[in-house]
Image: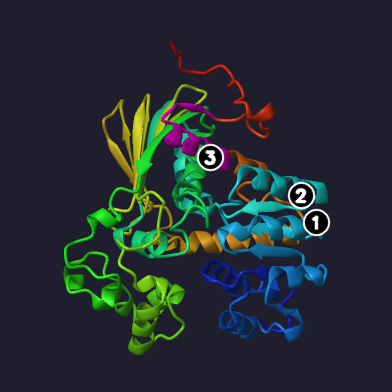
């Protein structure tokens, strides 16, 4: 960034992978300025401040210290751990910051409502990082449906293949392994997939059911001879979830050193990795951890129009792009996050689209979408207009409510109604849904 850089100013709360990614994009485009940071990890804080030339008086060890300094920027990016989203969002919105908030917006429905209400009281913009809305791939699928290319959408199937090693890293050994520390996996990993399905279909589900559990990563599935730590394990070489293999293989690859290895250690040497695996949480056997989140789940949806949908998230897959099929009355669409194929039922012909392939990553990452989201947030700040943003706080709250309804359904073994958009049902009751449109129901 040069001294001539102008544009909106941004404070970053949480200088981990996401916060740093958004900040680097803002710096690279020179359309805005990152002027303050709050980060508890001293090494991350120091590196981030040096990269963005942030002076010591605007470098803080906690978001509360940043808030105590008064409003220092036009907007704030909040990329802390999930349980630490609501409080800084409420406080900073109240100080006049426009907010870009990592998903999930909060770990409880009540806190999510507080975040939205705080932004509305302050008159500030609030956008949740539903990055999947910001890709050319998503725009093209939306346009195909809006143009009637498959007639009336009847059924949607959406798959999120988490990846066996990614799940072990984040949801067995890592920060999202326990509901009491972050939330259910459907929320922490997949709320933006549920949001994406709502965005594509143009309506929010009215009823949901759900099934899923922690099936594999349990003590009773521990192989004979396995040790509590991979470094001590005589069967480690044949284990798909070997921490030793995963993290040592990251060395020498800058992207993989940033993630997943960056969550394990700052010491990017073999000795540093082995020391972290000896003493830290990421060296534990996946069958001897304190994890309790699901490792696979399906959500069944009924939309007000009568259309239906299914969403599946699973650990037991490659680390890959989402895969989607949408079946309509006059055609169907299939996409893998990069390419889209459309079959016309009249002609029988298949048309293939590959929207801006340079902006899609075939290995499942959404770096380009992160960049597009950062650009949209800066543009909204510069214009004083939320139009560049893909959704607002109320839309995000609606998406989150579908996830909470699905979790209630999974635990109770029921079909559960989703509370009405933009309003909670009184006394916790479930709100009646509007009559179905377009497709007759019995």
**Mark 1 nearby-residue class (10 Å; few <14, some 14–19, many ≥20):** some
Which mark, residue 404? Answer: 3
Q: Which residues are magenta?
A: 399-417
Near-viewer residue (78 or 277): 277
| Residue 200 percent location from the top left of the image | 49, 39
Q: Is residue 412 magenta?
A: yes
Question: In terms of secondary structure, where does tag 3 sit?
Answer: helix
Above or below: residue 281 compared with residue 278: above
Above or below: residue 355 compared with residue 73: above
Near-viewer residue (98 or 202): 98
Which mark, residue 118? Answer: 2
State whether the magenta stretch is mostly helix, strand or loop: helix
| Residue 236 percent location from the top left of the image | 21, 71
Q: Is residue 65 magenta?
A: no
Quadrant showing the N terminus: bottom right
Residue at left offset 59%, top offset 73%: 15
Question: In terms of secondary structure, where does tag 2 sit?
Answer: helix
Q: CA distance from mark 3 to mark 1?
A: 26 Å
The reply to whether dot 2 and dot 1 touch (C-beta < 8 Å) is: yes
Q: Earlier in the sequence, mark 3 or mark 1?
A: 1
| Residue 376 percent location from the top left of the image | 63, 58
């Amino acid at each position: 960034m040069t001294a001539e850089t102008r544009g909106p100013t941004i404070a970053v709360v949480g200088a981990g992978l996401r916060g740093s990614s958004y900040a680097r994009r803002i710096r690279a485009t020179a359309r805005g300025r990152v002027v303050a940071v709050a980060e508890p990890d001293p090494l991350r804080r120091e590196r981030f401040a040096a990269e963005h030339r942030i002076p010591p008086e605007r470098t803080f060890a906690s978001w509360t210290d940043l808030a105590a300094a008064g409003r220092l920027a036009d907007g704030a990016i909040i990329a802390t751990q999930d349980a630490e989203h609501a409080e800084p969002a409420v406080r900073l919105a109240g100080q006049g910051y426009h907010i870009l908030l990592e998903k999930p917006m909060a770990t409880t429905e009540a806190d999510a409502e507080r975040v939205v209400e705080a932004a509305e009281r302050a008159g500030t913009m609030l956008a949740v990082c539903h990055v999947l809305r910001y890709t050319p791939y998503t725009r093209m699928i939306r346009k195909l449906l809006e143009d009637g290319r498959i007639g009336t959408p009847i059924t949607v199937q959406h798959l999120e293949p988490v990846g066996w090693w990614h799940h072990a890293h984040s949801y067995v050994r890592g920060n999202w392994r326990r509901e009491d520390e972050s939330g259910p996996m459907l929320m922490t990993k997949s709320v933006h997939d549920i949001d994406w399905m709502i965005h594509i279909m143009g309506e929010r589900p009215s009823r949901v059911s759900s099934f899923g559990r922690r099936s594999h990563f349990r003590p009773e599935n521990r192989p004979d001879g396995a040790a509590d730590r991979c470094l001590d394990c005589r069967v480690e070489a044949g284990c798909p979830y070997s921490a030793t293999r995963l993290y040592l293989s990251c060395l020498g690859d800058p992207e993989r050193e940033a993630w997943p290895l960056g969550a394990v250690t700052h010491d990017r040497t073999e000795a540093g990795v082995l020391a972290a695996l000896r003493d830290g949480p990421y060296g534990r056997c996946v069958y001897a951890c304190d994890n309790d989140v699901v490792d696979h789940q399906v959500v069944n949806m009924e939309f007000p129009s009568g259309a239906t949908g299914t969403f599946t998230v699973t650990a037991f897959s490659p680390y890959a792009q989402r895969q989607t099929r949408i079946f309509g009355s006059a055609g169907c669409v299939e996409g893998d996050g990069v390419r889209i194929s459309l079959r016309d039922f009249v002609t029988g012909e298949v048309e293939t689209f590959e929207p801006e392939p340079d902006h899609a990553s075939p290995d499942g990452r959404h770096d380009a979408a992160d960049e597009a989201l950062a650009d949209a947030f800066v543009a909204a700040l510069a214009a004083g207009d939320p139009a560049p943003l893909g959704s607002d706080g109320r839309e995000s709250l609606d998406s989150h409510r579908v996830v909470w309804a699905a979790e209630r359904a999974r635990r109770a073994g029921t079909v559960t109604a989703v509370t009405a958009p933009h309003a909670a049902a009184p006394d916790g009751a479930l709100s009646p849904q509007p009559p179905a449109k377009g497709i007759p129901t019995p």
